[in-house]
Amino acid sequence: MNRDYSLSEIATYLEAELRGNSEARITGLSSLSSATGGDLSFLSNAKYVDQLTNCQAGAVMLVAEQASNYAGNCLVLDNPYAGYAKISAWFDTAPEHSPEVHPSAVVDTTAVIAGDTYIGPNVVIEAGVRIGAGCSLAANSFVGARSALGEGCSIGPNVTIYHDVVIGSHVRIHSGTVIGSDGFGFAPAGSDGWHKIHQLGGVEIGNKVEIGACCAIDRGAIDDTIIGDNVILDNHIHLAHNVIVGDNTAMAAGVIIAGSSTIGRNCTFAGASGAIGHLSICDNVHLTVCTLVTKNITEPGSYSSGMIPTAPSLAWKKNALRFGQLDVMARRLKTLEKKS
Amino acid sequence: MNRDYSLSEIATYLEAELRGNSEARITGLSSLSSATGGDLSFLSNAKYVDQLTNCQAGAVMLVAEQASNYAGNCLVLDNPYAGYAKISAWFDTAPEHSPEVHPSAVVDTTAVIAGDTYIGPNVVIEAGVRIGAGCSLAANSFVGARSALGEGCSIGPNVTIYHDVVIGSHVRIHSGTVIGSDGFGFAPAGSDGWHKIHQLGGVEIGNKVEIGACCAIDRGAIDDTIIGDNVILDNHIHLAHNVIVGDNTAMAAGVIIAGSSTIGRNCTFAGASGAIGHLSICDNVHLTVCTLVTKNITEPGSYSSGMIPTAPSLAWKKNALRFGQLDVMARRLKTLEKKS
Amino acid sequence: MNRDYSLSEIATYLEAELRGNSEARITGLSSLSSATGGDLSFLSNAKYVDQLTNCQAGAVMLVAEQASNYAGNCLVLDNPYAGYAKISAWFDTAPEHSPEVHPSAVVDTTAVIAGDTYIGPNVVIEAGVRIGAGCSLAANSFVGARSALGEGCSIGPNVTIYHDVVIGSHVRIHSGTVIGSDGFGFAPAGSDGWHKIHQLGGVEIGNKVEIGACCAIDRGAIDDTIIGDNVILDNHIHLAHNVIVGDNTAMAAGVIIAGSSTIGRNCTFAGASGAIGHLSICDNVHLTVCTLVTKNITEPGSYSSGMIPTAPSLAWKKNALRFGQLDVMARRLKTLEKKS
């Protein structure tokens, strides 16, 4: 698994200007502070510029302005952070499996598996499934009837994709995640509890989507649940039935979106944020950590709720008890103002 | 997978009064606004009555009062929403597997599997397990020693049911869910960290329960964790050891109930709500989204905490900082009142 | 699965002083209030001392001070709760599998599996994996390339351990949990969405760690994500890339720790608490339920946010609306004070 590239190979791939020894060997990536001789590092935030002084990296990716102050090997880039992202793929140690359908996999005879695809041990693929070229489905995953994956998808071990799910190309899904489970739809049935509303829609996922571990993306009630292109989802995310997520939107761990809500494009939702059902959030909205959206958001911008500064527990408790008096306090304040 | 029923068949099943063309063919369900000729739709909320005017549905389920204003085919029902729920089963495209024990399944010789049951690929069933008639256990699921399922249960792919779990009839469990994992019980052991308290209880689940994806229902410490009949649980729900959930209770996604708490019957908990341990919540309690219960609730009704209206982040921050001054503000207010 | 021990055997194991009938047969554990003749019970909290009066247990573990008031069989211990924890292992009914590699398991020929280890049905073990002596890997679990487990680990069904994860000895991981999924690292790519930052680090887990069900522990971006010795994690916990958790720390269900945050030793985080990224929490910190940490914590102690007393929904709503006026109220209060 050892990687060893010349600095010039990397410069060519990143379309970067190379200053210094083009034959320097790069065997890893590291931060400025812990890099050693074989490491490529990067300076993406000017506040770390002092770390260049004693940096032991074999080479550093940086912008032209910083490069002029740096004596070591460097790659000059408009966006060093993007350069780090791109070159990180060359150092990924995730095993790449040769194309095969493992003998222990159970693949229905009506499934169509394109060439150059890896179907790992104990993977189960039901009738009518279509898998595009260059996909990898790791061990113990499941793809239900008639679902389809585009090209170059990477499905982790123990992933569940239910029936009638349509996934684009270059989609990556991590372990434990479930796509197409039933939406939570029930009609009250009095003392009998609940009538189940069978969930007849599917899930549509665009291209270049990444979905983390232990997420649950429910199928739609009648129409589909939809995730746009380039959407990135962290772990433990719940998207209920008929949620729509616009292109390029990012959601951090623990986000919960209730049923039939529509999220715009280019949104960034911090961890444990979410939205109640049947509402709409426009493009370019940022939610800070733990924010719960309870009304439509129609203007781009950053929105918050939920986050109140941490305090020692005794102090917190005193103030928290006062929360229950807020309305009364406001009225008393008004009374005083009238008197004054 | 194409479905095609006459309106009269559907009317008979729903015990509905049919007005219009009894031979109309119904091939799908849809909302009033997007229905086309072969679709059956429903009007369950009077505020959508205007959508009847241009509705293109093949037939509509509605109450008698609305039916008199509608010229198209219709099914008259006391509860059109329940009618929609019941008939949705006829249009469910989830694959129905023929009864078999798939050759790749690993079933202990002492397990008892009733007839008419589907045991999918790579399912693992340990010693002493009992599976009732008409069950379906999808691919890659696991049932541990001595656990029992009643009749007509549907267990999704990649579900884990640990040992000594007793599940009633017509229970549905979605992928990624874990039933009977150890409760979180540890005794402090000083510098050695923690002594594990082995969890000796099981889990009992009633009839007609539905459990969503990626839930974790822990086994009891000594006695069992108990879920009553007709309970419905959405995704990502955590029920700790020895939680008891009463009949007909519904919990939306992300609910967390800590150990040994007892939840009544007919409760409805909105998303991301929860309760700390060792408390009791009576029947007919509704929790709004994100509510955390920290004391017993003894009166039916709707309870809240956690939800504060979303605001632009700058405005939120100003107010959130004042939270830490609440107790002081209350005292200052009182001082002013004394003076005035 | 019936257990039957003499009280003297148990006393010897626990190094307890036995008072009463040393040949009493103990067949189960129970609480003081529900124990019957064959049960061993314990009194660990003085407030339950009255339950000794009518206790039907075959024997009770208690401290010397309480033992003098109890006429029945008893085991005198400095710490009866720890005694209960230790002896609970003798009554655990979890099936113990004989050492074997199940024929349906798919084990790479380069993996090294020590003796006395159980590899269950459909377990998949990739190239270069090392499994220590006395481990148990239950059905349908996955261990990726080059990962290593120490001795005596217990891995539940449907667990996923990605590549290059190093796990110590006597570690227990419950079903649905994912170790080593990619951290959530992406560089903005304008209208192309995001450049994935491949996650090159691994996960290191110490000895005697227990991880509950449905947790996701991400691998590091460059360096490793690290979990110390004796750490205990409940269900549905998310540890992002490069989180470090110190020895002996306990986290209850639903805790979320964002990327690169460092948690000290001997911390106890209550349910649904968490921390944003790139911060540090010192040793011996307790977080109450739902607390979100947004700044470094440098002093041991109990900290809170998030928890505000539950109220009837109408009362809550009135007060919650006032939250948005808090800053203005504070200013008005100040104005009044100046006038008075």
Image (spheres, coloured by chain):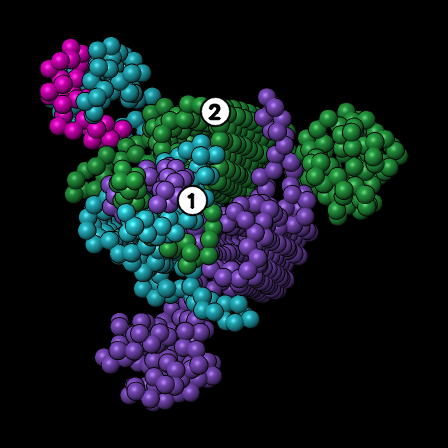
Chain colours: A purple, B green, C cyan
Q: Residues within 10 Å of mark 2 (few under 14, many from 20)?
A: some
Q: Which amino acid, mark 2?
A: Pro
What is the x, y in percent for residue A264? 57, 59
- Per the image, the residue denoted by label 2 is B300
- Per the image, the residue denoted by label 1 is C322
The quadrant of the rendering that contains the N terminus of chain C is top left
Chain under disc 2? B
Residue A226 seen in this snapshot: yes
The answer to whether residue C73 is magenta is: yes
Q: Residue furthest front?
A: A340
Q: Secondary structure at mark 2?
A: loop
Disc number placed over residue C147 in the picture, else none: none
What is the x, y in percent for residue A144? 61, 47
Q: Are marks 2 and 1 on the same chain?
A: no
Q: Which amino acid, mark 1?
A: Arg
What is the x, y in percent for residue B180? 42, 33
Q: Where does the magenta region start and end?
A: C60-88
Chain under disc 1? C
The answer to whether residue C307 is magenta is: no
